[in-house]
Image: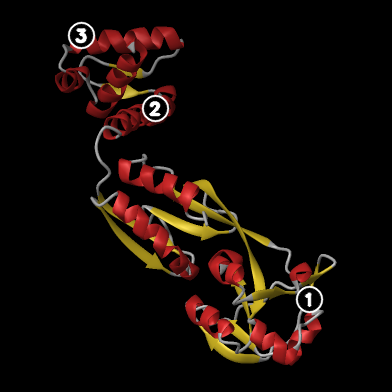
Amino acid sequence: MDSLGALSAFVQAADANGFTEAGRKLGVSPSAVSKAVGRLEERLGVRLFHRSTRTITLTAEGSRFLDRCRRILCEVEAAETELTQTQTAPQGKLRVSLPSMGIMFMPKFAAFKRRHPQIEVELDFSDRLVDVIDEGFDAVIRTGEPADSRLMVRKIGSYRKVLVGSPTYFDQTGFPTQPEDLADHACLIYRYATTGKLDRWPLRRGGDPVDVALPTSVVMNTLEPQICLAEQGLGIACIPDIAIRRQLQAGTLVTVLNDCMPNTTMLNVLWPSSRHLSPKLRVFVDFAAESLLEP
């Protein structure tokens, strides 16, 4: 703790360009600040300030050391704030961005809201790559590997896209036995709302991608219509398995070509690394990691 006091005295002196103002801010005498900085210099074996009778200026070593000291003191302050806030109830606005398929998580979010009624939840559904920090999000749910080094990440789990149709549909058309058979089937295709591009089904054979020209029976840009139309026997859809657990269990949808759809996709919760985990953010990260993919 004596070391932290010396670092604080050094930073205050550097900011104030003198020991007198630094002492006033710290509530001690100028000589106490000067002595603390002197002991720090002696311990480090370098001179941090050039001193004259009226002013002090940072040496080159002092300038480099100052940046590190600021980060250290900020981390200590953030740790103290975080520890203090763990004693308070989670509350305030929580802005979260999710991919469009996040609509399937609404029952989970309802449970989260009931558990934490003082948190004002604002949800943004978008398949575009949002800028978490610049756009002011507290957290985002995203697929794939995170590429932004400014973000912390916690794994939620993984899912797999599957090809599904209703038993009634396959009674009429027969089951496809290889990817090329899909050219003779009605396909219910998802279109990304942000880019306008059609979803490419991740078909593979022996580890290599298979490209099939899919006939588009119906195109839509939300998940629920895909599921509904597939259940109604209007064609085959490519849907995340986590979105249709109930339908698969009930038998209203069945999967086909499972060996040709081996790829799994990671789902993560991310938040700015510069932001300490406030109570509202901490409970949300825990909720997302522990509950979001539970059946």
Quadrant in which residue 103 is drawn: bottom left
Relative placement, left or right, of 193 versus 67 is right
Q: Which residue is mark 1?
A: 210
User: What's the distance in space between the residues labelled 2 and 3, CA to CA?
Assistant: 24 Å
As helix, strand or loop, the secondary structure at mark 3 comes to helix
Image color mode? secondary structure
Question: At which x and y percent is residue 292?
Answer: 48, 55
Let me know if residue 137 appears in the view: no
Q: Residues within 10 Å of mark 3 (few under 14, many from 20)?
A: few
Asked if marks 2 and 3 touch (Cβ < 8 Å), the reply is no
Let me know if residue 241 appears in the view: yes
Q: Nearer the viewer, mark 3 or mark 1?
A: 1
Residue type at tag 1:
Val
Question: At which x and y percent is residue 250?
Answer: 58, 71
Question: At which x and y percent is residue 206?
Answer: 85, 66
Relative placement, left or right, of 250 versus 283 is right
Quadrant in which residue 94 is drawn: bottom left
Residue type at tag 2:
Ile
Residue 119 position (above or below residue 218): above
Q: Which residue is mark 3?
A: 31
Q: Which residue is mark 2?
A: 72
Q: In percent of the image, x 78 and y 80: which residue is there?
A: 179
Residue 36 position (above or below residue 124): above
Q: Outermost residue toward the front?
A: 250
269 and 276: which one is in front? 269
Residue 9 position (above or below residue 78): above
